Image (spheres, grey):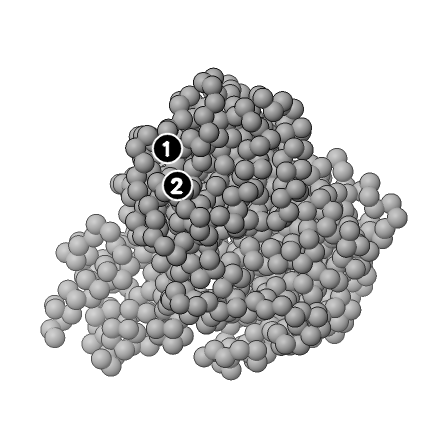
């Protein structure tokens, strides 16, 4: 467990620099692109080489790095990192028939280029790592930070999760059946009965440590599991609740990663049935589906705990109005990578 | 092409190829060092510039030591292009 | 705090597909680096590679793989994984237990299928059999599904230091009590993508790499996989302990995307912190398996950092990349296995292709096979993005 002190999120919704989540911005051609933000604060000498993913991460981290000049390390979760650069380099290989190629795309294409760039900008020589385990890349970053803070109780870390849409990974995910064949509007994500979801992207960055003072929220527990067995997901969730030392009726809100793919909806419904008194809210219509979408969910839960207001378009099931103290986030990627997080108000 | 036009063309190509944001051709002086304190380019840029010479002027530089001699400033690059271009 | 022991190892490199063949190759000073046979690329004959001399078909037959869509990286990984769990005596039940973690590292993933990726990424009509296996996560997910694993599963990519960080993450999970055992390692296969990438940076050697030599001119890319089974002290009473993972550290050089800073702050800090974590003085390290890629930048900077830490008493060191090339995401795990062979057999293997030392540092790697008293070994792994890691393994 650890405390969240400061967060920034760049997403397809209005989340940076101001936050306004009540008006849902819409998808185009089954894609939700993150909103462009100003890169005025990034030195041109560094900016010129940055692909979209790195730029998003650096823009989101800017305000945090300005405020926290003595961070002890940088922990990033990203399944693909700079996908656009990766494919640009791939295209060069074929276009120039393995001839003379420019190295910048190659160097920027490695997923660790994001954490590396943040380390470079902040001259941070501490712990620096990139978790890339597809739909649990961000959750592993959380587990990493939890262990780091256990060993180094006085440390403060920069933690983040991000991925980007490129035409190419969109094509590959389409071919795999994870993108809907029919074009939908994101506001109708949960109403159809078809497979696939819509694509998305974004970044959420967090400053975390063990210090309760001044913190917004506390991440009390995180748990991951790989399985397609519904009963096992249910068992793991019950164990998660037990280990979190919370009664089921103390869960005020359940934020699920339902993504409009009819193959996976039963998982969310099962989890909902365990906490009948909780408000059930969803977030993937705001963001689209991608591997590190749970980083946005954590940012969102943190914001909601602070704001004590749940935008109407998020609500799947309303309950009697009560103060929001404990939020459980359940995410599911491709039906076999599940995660649970418990976030509580400080 | 006269050497003035070639210099102008090269500056434009360098700015585009290296994505030198907020830099205009007239900001690059002919004798301004490309690396270090001058234009502030680094080792990756030097490789990018070798690719630029290959793709635009058909010049192949294999030996990095030769590269260092050519990639000093706009003047040295243009001299080399004039002597060695194959397109 | 719980001690963490290595109870099993598995390996597959250009030197061979078992611990024995790798040890024999190292003892004999064999170089597995040669021309590329496995797939076509413009550089197959002009550059040299540390290729695993088994085709995908041979590997599939050897591993009894019938399903489609398994990338070469996954095949290499599975082979090394099988050896490691067998040596540690893990049953299928042990492997799938919720207290068994799997932490994998790779940088190439399914991108060894560069041509297939190019086709799949540029169209939306029909995918190849590999369409779901391009990402780095695909290799770990393949193993997770094959063995129905229920513990913490993770994939790390910090470029060339990836699998050193995978080992570190596994150790920390055990120390924290999140796992009783962790199967950790790395795998990467040769790919048109990385060959062209490294070539574009002008850091591939024109011949065999010559780490720490004054005339070194770059690295050779290689491929392979290695896994280690790590177990908590309290679960190893009836097991053979191969080594203790005593120290580990991860730092960043914070200097440049693809080169190390002149004084090697990142490498220095990684070694210093690993020593501190292990509670050892520099003079207690008997041998270093260096990162030693053979590039102009790495070897000089690594030498300077070693001199800074060890003063004028730099321990015996070698670069096993002179035998097998640079296996990228697998190199940290492969070199961990090699370091543990040094400990187990109390011997040092020769570093190859060295003639004359670097002027500024004058360090000379071990060039002949010798027996030696080795209690603690250090293994360095540094990567693009300034990602530096050092591990320390100790004799049990």
- Decide which of C200, C188 is in the foreground and name it: C188
From the top left corner, tell me how far across and down residue A5 is, in percent.
Answer: 47, 26
In this rendering, does residue B21 appear at all?
A: yes
**Residue B84 against residue C8 in the figure, above or below:** below
Q: Is residue B55 left or right of residue C169?
A: left
Q: Which image quarter: residue A43?
A: top left
Q: Do the residues at discs 1 and 2 belong to one chain?
A: yes
For disc 1, the chain is A
Residue at horizontal 70 percent and vertical 56 percent from the top = C147
- Decide which of C272, A94 is in the foreground and name it: A94
Mark pair 1, 2: CA separation: 9 Å
Query: Disc 1 designates what residue?
Result: A313
Query: Disc 2 designates what residue?
Result: A285
For disc 2, the chain is A
Reading the chain from its start, which is encountered first: label 1 or label 2?
2
Residue at horizontal 43 percent and vertical 68 percent from the top = C126
Is disc 1 placed on a helix, strand or loop? helix
From the top left corner, tell me how far across and down residue A275 is, in percent.
Answer: 57, 28
Q: Which image quarter: residue A304?
A: top left
Query: Pointer 2: residues within 10 angstroms few (<14), some, or many (20+)?
Result: many
Q: Is residue B12 left or right of residue C30?
A: left
Query: Pointer 1: residues within 10 angstroms few (<14), some, or many (20+)?
Result: some
- Decide which of C251, B37 is in the foreground and name it: C251
Circles 1 and 2: CB distance less than 8 Å?
Answer: yes
Residue at horizontal 34 percent and vertical 34 percent from the top = A15
């Amino acid at each position: 467990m650890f405390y969240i002190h400061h967060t920034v999120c760049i997403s397809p919704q209005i989340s940076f620099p101001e936050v306004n989540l009540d008006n849902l911005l819409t998808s185009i051609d089954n894609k939700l692109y993150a909103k462009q933000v100003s890169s005025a604060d990034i030195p041109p000498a560094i900016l010129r080489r940055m692909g979209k993913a790195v730029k998003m991460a650096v823009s989101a981290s800017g305000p945090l790095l300005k405020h926290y000049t003595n961070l002890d390390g940088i922990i990033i979760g990203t399944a693909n990192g700079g996908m656009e650069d990766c494919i640009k380099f791939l295209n060069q290989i074929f276009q120039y028939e393995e001839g003379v190629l420019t190295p910048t795309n190659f160097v920027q294409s490695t997923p660790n280029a994001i954490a590396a760039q943040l380390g470079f900008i902040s001259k941070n020589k501490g712990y620096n790592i990139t978790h890339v385990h597809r739909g649990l890349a961000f959750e592993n970053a959380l587990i990493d930070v939890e262990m780091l803070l256990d060993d180094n109780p006085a440390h403060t870390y920069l933690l983040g999760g991000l991925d980007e849409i490129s035409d190419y990974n969109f094509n590959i995910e389409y071919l795999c059946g994870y993108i809907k064949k029919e074009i939908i509007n994101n506001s109708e994500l949960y109403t159809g009965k078809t497979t696939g979801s819509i694509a998305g992207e974004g970044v959420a960055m967090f400053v975390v440590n063990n210090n309760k003072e001044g913190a917004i929220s506390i991440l009390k527990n995180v748990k991951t599991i790989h399985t397609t067995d519904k009963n096992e997901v249910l068992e793991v969730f019950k164990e998660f609740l037990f280990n979190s030392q919370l009664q089921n009726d103390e869960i005020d809100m359940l934020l699920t990663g339902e993504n409009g793919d009819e193959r996976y909806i039963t998982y969310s419904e099962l989890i909902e049935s365990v906490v009948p008194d909780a408000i059930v809210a969803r977030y993937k219509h705001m963001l689209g589906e991608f591997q590190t979408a749970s980083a946005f969910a954590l940012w969102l839960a943190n914001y909601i705990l602070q704001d004590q207001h749940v935008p109407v378009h998020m609500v799947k099931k309303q309950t009697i109005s009560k103060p929001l103290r404990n939020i459980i986030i359940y995410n599911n990627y491709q039906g076999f990578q599940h995660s649970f997080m418990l976030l509580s108000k400080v | 092409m006269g050497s003035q036009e070639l210099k102008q063309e090269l500056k434009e190509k360098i700015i585009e190829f290296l994505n030198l944001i907020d830099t205009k051709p007239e900001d690059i002086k002919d004798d301004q060092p490309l690396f270090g304190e001058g234009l502030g380019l680094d080792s990756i840029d030097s490789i990018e510039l070798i690719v630029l010479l290959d793709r635009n002027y058909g010049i192949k530089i294999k030996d990095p030591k030769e590269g260092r001699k050519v990639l000093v400033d706009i003047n040295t690059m243009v001299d080399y292009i004039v002597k060695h271009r194959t397109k | 705090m719980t001690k963490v022991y290595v109870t099993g190892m598995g390996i597959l490199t250009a030197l061979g597909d078992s611990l024995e063949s790798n040890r024999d190759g190292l003892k004999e000073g064999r170089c597995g680096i040669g021309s590329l046979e496995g797939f076509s690329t413009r550089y197959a004959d002009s550059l040299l590679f540390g290729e695993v001399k088994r085709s995908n078909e041979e590997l599939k037959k050897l591993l009894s793989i019938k399903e489609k869509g398994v990338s070469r990286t996954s095949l290499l990984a599975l082979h090394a994984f099988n050896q490691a769990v067998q040596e540690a005596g893990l049953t299928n039940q042990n492997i799938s237990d919720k207290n068994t973690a799997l932490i994998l590292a790779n940088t190439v993933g399914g991108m060894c299928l560069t041509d297939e990726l190019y086709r799949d990424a540029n169209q939306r009509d029909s995918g190849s059999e590999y369409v779901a296996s391009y990402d780095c996560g695909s290799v770990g997910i393949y193993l997770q599904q094959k063995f129905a694993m229920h513990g913490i599963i993770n994939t790390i990519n910090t470029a060339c230091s990836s699998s050193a960080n995978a080992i570190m993450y596994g150790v920390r999970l055990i120390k924290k009590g999140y796992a009783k055992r962790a199967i950790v390692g790395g795998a990467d296969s040769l790919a048109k993508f990385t060959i062209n990438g490294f070539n574009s940076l002008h850091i591939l050697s024109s011949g065999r790499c010559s780490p720490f030599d004054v005339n070194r001119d770059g690295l050779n890319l290689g491929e392979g996989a290695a896994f280690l089974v790590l177990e908590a002290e309290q679960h190893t009473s009836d097991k053979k302990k191969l080594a203790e993972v005593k120290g580990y550290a991860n730092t960043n050089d914070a200097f440049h995307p693809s080169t190390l800073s002149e004084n090697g702050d990142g490498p220095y800090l990684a070694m210093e912190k690993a020593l501190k974590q292990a509670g050892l003085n520099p003079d207690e390290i008997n041998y270093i398996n260096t990162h030693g890629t053979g590039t102009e930048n790495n070897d000089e900077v690594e030498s300077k950092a070693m001199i800074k830490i060890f003063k004028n008493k730099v321990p015996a060191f070698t670069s096993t990349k002179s035998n097998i090339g640079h296996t990228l995401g697998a190199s940290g795990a492969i070199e961990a296995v090699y370091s543990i062979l040094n400990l187990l057999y109390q011997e040092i293997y020769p570093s190859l292709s060295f003639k004359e030392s670097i002027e500024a540092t004058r360090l000379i790697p071990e060039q002949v096979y010798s027996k030696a008293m080795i209690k603690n070994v250090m293994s360095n792994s540094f990567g693009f993005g300034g990602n530096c890691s050092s591990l320390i393994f100790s004799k049990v």
